Each structure stands twice: as C-alpha cells, then as structure tokens.
C-alpha cells in the first residue's frame, strides 16, 4: 500500500524540527576530552615537572565509568518508582550538556549533586508521579539537602538556557517505525522489534561514546539491528521502508554516523551477552545478525528496595561501557539498595537476559 502523502508530510515536518534541535540547541560536546585538554595546558603552564595541586587531584575521579554508574543508578530509580526509562535519557541530556558548559572538571561532590538534580528535574517535567522531598533527600543519604538540590537546579537550568525538551532516540524510533509497511510482519514480531529497539537505545545511554552522536543516528542504528534480528530473512524486502525514511528524514542507512552507531550498538549487544552468537555477513551486507532474538517482554521492572547515592572513591572499579552489568529490566536480584559507588554492579547475582 502506498504511503499516505499527508502522513508523510507530517512525519517529514517532525523530522525537520527534531533534527534541527539535535544539531543545534541540544548538541553536546565531548566534555571529558575538553577537560583533558585544559588539564594538559595547565600542566604545560605549571612547568616541565607537571606537578598538580591538591584541587586538581580532587577532581580527577570523574570518568566515563563514573557516568556509567550514574546511568545505572538512574535506571534503578526509574524502575523502582515505575518511571518511564526515556526519562533517564532526558536527565542525562541535562547532565551531559551542563557538564559541557564547565571549563574544567567539577569536583566529585558537585558531580553527584548535579546527577541527583538532573534526574529529579527530568522526573518533575516528564512524569505524572513525582518523588516527594523526603524521598529525594533520603536517596542522598543526607549528603545533600533539599536546598542544595534546588540551588543546583536553578544553576543547571540557567546554564542550559532553559532548553529542557531534547529530542530522544525513542522519539526518533517512533517516527521511523510509523513508516513501517502495514501487514509486513505479525503483530507480535513488531512488538519484539520495538522492544529490542528501545532496549538498544537504553544501552546507548550507558556508553559515553554516544554522547556526541545524534539521537536520530542512534535510533536508526538500533532499528537496523532489531530488524536484522527479527526479520533477518526479509530484511532486503524493506527497501520501500528505508526509502520512505530517506524521503522524510534525509537519512540513509549508509550514513557514516548511522553505521558507526549501529556497529557500536551491535558490539555492545554482543559483548553484554544479549546475543548468543555472531553470523558473519556477506561483503555486500551492511550489518551482521544475531542467531536468535532476545526476550525482553518478560523482563522484571520492579525493584525491592529504594536506591541511594553516596560518594565513591577515586579508586572506584572500572566498569566497561559494553553493558556487561546492564539488565533488561534494570533489576538487581538483591534489590537496589546499592549506591552509585558500590561495586555490587558486578556481583554474581546480577541477572542478564540472553538469547537461547
């Protein structure tokens, strides 16, 4: 069936608006690289010995691994309180863009305060149910008071120029999949396609590498993988679908950033244990396939205990961004009483949902 021209025009307008947003107002930078360059310049200024003062040493702990722990903690909160997991992406958009406004690294305490503030801000703006003040303070174990969070909230909103509605990968996925041909696949298959696509976009939030990548590229890369998993035998019958995507969004599955995002997501998906094996592609194929789909529909979403955040030391264990500790429901079998700095993220009790 030929697509409805009016529907196509409406989708095209939405793509234009969201793509303009992601390329301008909501475009973050590689703030960790920027901070490293600033520190290198400071080292040169200090002299050949490169000695650093105490304040510099205190700020050396903010890394990709710290950010990943914050993301895991945020997903725990979302699952425990039944918030939408897309809210976590929004909170990280706030946090990443706020950190990008800093000329140098924040100290550890300020970083944690900013993380608590951004997840609370995203919840206030995007969720019907809110966290009451006592709950919010209790999650901080007394480290921060409500007044601290409120002051930081104003600082963050001002630094972001009150741009608080970023385009998300999930929003782009919804637009892309709205172009999918009707009756091409059974309903339950399309449900699985949507769930795995969403899960892949959640994996992207964990990985700092995706901070500088456009949400649209992440979304299209995730859809490509999900279609390869669930419609592997018919993926080459989807030319009309990808043609409609190109017409409405101007994006091609061969765009460099889209391919990079697709490859990174696939690597994360495989290394996290979510695909049972790897089937090598033919030379003309764009991507590779998993042998069987991952069941995410039955993944548990409810936690057993509240989440807390506490200070982590500079020697916090390294956690790979390959989603090795990430579960499809965010569930930790022992509950989620662990704090951001705990090493419990790699405990044997951590459940993964793998393909069989």
Image (cartoon, grey):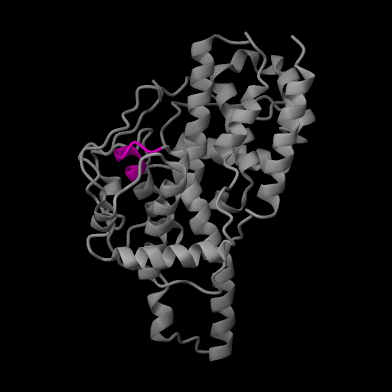
Looking at the image, which residue is at 37% across and 43% down?
A: 75
Q: Is residue 115 above or below residue 278?
A: below
Question: Considering only vertical position in the picture, is 273 above or below 49?
Answer: above
Q: Is residue 215 above or below residue 38?
A: above
Magenta residues span 76-83
Residue at 51% over, 64% down: 99
Can residue 80 be found in the magenta stretch?
Answer: yes
Q: Position of residue 355 (x, y in %)?
A: 41, 23
Residue 322 is at least partly visible in this image: no
**120, 337: nearer the viewer:** 120
| Residue 100 occupies quadrant | bottom right
Residue 76, percent from left and from top: 33, 43
Where does residue 180 sit, x and y in percent of width and height?
65, 19
Task: Give yes or no for residue 140 being in the magenta stretch.
Answer: no
Q: What secondary structure is the stretch in magenta mostly built from?
A: helix
The image shows residue 35, relative to residue 24, as above or below, that is below
Residue 27 is situated, as x and y percent measured from the top left of the image, at 64, 54
Q: How many marks?
A: 0
- Residue in the picture at 22% in, 41% down: 335
Q: Quadrant of the C terminus?
A: top left
Question: Which quadrant of the rendered structure holds the N terminus?
Answer: top right
């Amino acid at each position: 069936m030929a697509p409805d021209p009016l529907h196509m025009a409406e989708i095209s307008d939405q793509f234009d608006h969201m793509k303009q947003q992601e390329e301008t107002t909501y475009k973050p930078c590689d703030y960790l690289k920027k901070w490293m360059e600033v520190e290198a310049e400071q080292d040169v200024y200090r002299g050949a010995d490169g000695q650093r003062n105490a304040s510099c040493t205190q700020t050396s702990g903010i890394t990709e691994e710290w950010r990943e722990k914050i993301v895991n903690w945020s997903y725990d909160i979302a699952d425990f309180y039944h918030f939408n997991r897309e809210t976590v992406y929004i909170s990280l958009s706030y946090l990443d863009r706020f950190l990008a406004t800093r000329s140098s690294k924040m100290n550890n305490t300020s970083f944690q305060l900013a993380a608590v503030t951004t997840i609370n801000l995203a919840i206030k703006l995007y969720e019907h149910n809110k966290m009451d003040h006592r709950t919010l303070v209790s999650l901080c174990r007394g480290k921060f008071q409500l007044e601290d969070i409120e002051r930081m909230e104003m600082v963050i909103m001002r630094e972001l120029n009150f741009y608080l509605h970023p385009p998300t990968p999930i929003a782009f996925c919804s637009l892309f999949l709205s172009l999918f041909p009707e009756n091409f696949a059974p309903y339950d298959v399309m449900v699985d396609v949507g769930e795995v696509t969403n899960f892949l976009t959640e994996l992207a939030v964990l990985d700092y590498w995706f901070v500088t990548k456009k949400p649209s590229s992440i979304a299209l890369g995730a859809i490509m993988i999900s279609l390869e998993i669930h419609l592997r035998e018919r993926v080459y019958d989807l030319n009309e679908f990808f043609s409609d995507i190109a017409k409405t969004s101007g994006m091609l599955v061969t765009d460099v950033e889209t391919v990079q995002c697709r490859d990174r997501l696939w690597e994360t998906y495989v290394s996290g244990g979510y695909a049972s094996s790897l089937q090598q592609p033919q030379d003309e194929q764009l991507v590779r396939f998993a042998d069987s789909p991952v069941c995410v529909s039955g993944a548990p979403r409810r936690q057993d205990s509240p989440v807390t955040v506490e200070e982590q030391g500079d020697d916090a264990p390294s956690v790979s961004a390959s989603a090795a500790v990430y579960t499809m429901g965010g569930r930790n079998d022992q509950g989620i009483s662990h704090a951001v700095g705990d090493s419990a993220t790699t405990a044997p009790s951590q459940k993964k949902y793998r393909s069989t």
